[in-house]
Amino acid sequence: MAKEKIVLAYSGGLDTSVAIKWLQETYNFDVIAVALDVGEGKDLDFVQKKALQVGAIKSIVVDAKETFANDFVLPALQANAMYEGKYPLVSALSRYLISRVLVEIAEKEGAVAVAHGCTGKGNDQVRFDVSFTALNPDLKIVAPVREWGWTRDEEIEYAKQHNIPIPINLDNPYSIDQNLWGRSCECGVLEDPWAAPPEGAYDMTNSIDDAPDQPEEIEITFEKGVPTALNGEKLSVAQLILKLNKIAGKHGVGRIDHVENRLVGIKSREVYETPAATTLILAHRELEFLTQPREVAQFKPIIEQKITQVIYEGLWYSPLMNALKAFVQETQQYVSGVVRVKLHKGHAIVVGRKSASSLYSHELATYAEGDQFDHKAALGFIKLWGLPTKVHAQVNEAALGQGYTTPITIVDEKDAVTQ
């Protein structure tokens, strides 16, 4: 009788390598390992071969950079998504693509289950489990690390007993996750919120001390909310992000030190590097200020906050997310133009923006010659705009018998003297 198959999200690290053997021993599964290239720069040929060496019956590598950039990063960029105002959802976004690919492969391979390497303490377990259920409720879900509950030493001992290669960087004190949208780093000394992150916690960005002394200006072109060119060079979304990571990272842009509120109810201290994400979100928002009418510009942040929360909390494949994305997409119809950004010593500063759809009118805004604003119209506007406040004040002051009084101290007082 043929064994049942399970599809495992495989990174090549200790946890998921041990998981291959553990799934075989514990559940008698044939394991299909799947690794995705989402722009982290990992040697996926090595990862693919290692999965087979450990015992997977098949090892699949998927080049998903463009899909990740277009289907997941781009909607987040257009929503200016920053969890708690600081975190551009680096890891969260990739989990939804990994989930989708695993389900697709499971259906193609006739697998009965999918598996991931998340612990029971993090947010990713929620994102994976909820996404799997939304995409195919009939698939079983197995989370080996969450189930076995071993210490690090116990896991290493299991690996040694089963001849599973142990990564040479196992003594690295940090837990790292990276894709083209950025890099996250936690554990080790970072678990003390009072301790400053050491330089060893960073990889994508220069420190302010090591960043160039001379600022650099770049131009980012957007078409309907999509970044399409960097310094006039046409690039795909993924290519543009990867290139901008290097340019902005050189100037130390995108370092984030954040004590965040996890979905599971605890606070965790995370260090992120998001040079491209930080720069693009800033530029995109500034272009929206130029091209969106006041009502849209003032209401959209409400939707942005909700869509950010939905992404962080594992609900990408929910009906609510579909509705929120539709709203954001509608707001991007006129977000086209060029934004000029200065990069210098950890800062990204917008210094110029232009658009054929710009709602900025020099003739209306200027105080110089050529001013076309109807100043006389302002009087009637103010009178009607303030009418509800005036009526309220009149009614309530009459009822109270007095208005507001402000205590003041007269420093000096002089009468005019007629000469």
Image: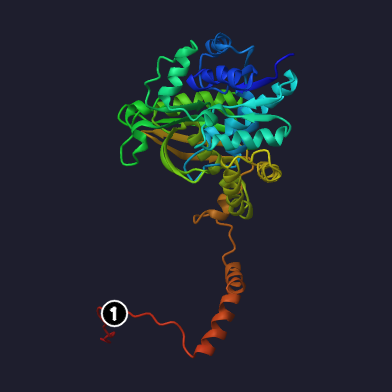
Question: Where's residue 231, x and y in %?
Answer: 52, 27
Vertical order, 323 against 200 (above or below): below
Residue at numbered disc 1: 409
Side of 178 where 58 appears, left or right = right
Q: Nearer the viewer, residue 112 or 52?
A: 112
Q: Residue at x 55, y 25 (%)?
A: 240
Q: Residue at x 56, y 47 (%)?
A: 289
Establish if 148 lies above or below 405: above
**Of the pair 272 and 129, the residue shown nearer to us:** 129
**Can you see residue 190?**
yes
**Most foreground residue, 174 or 221:** 174
Vertical side of 41 occupied by 358: above or below: below
Q: Position of residue 297 (x, y in %)?
A: 59, 51
Q: Is residue 140 left or right of residue 165?
A: right
Residue at 56 percent of width and 76 percent of height: 389
The kind of residue tagged 1 is Thr
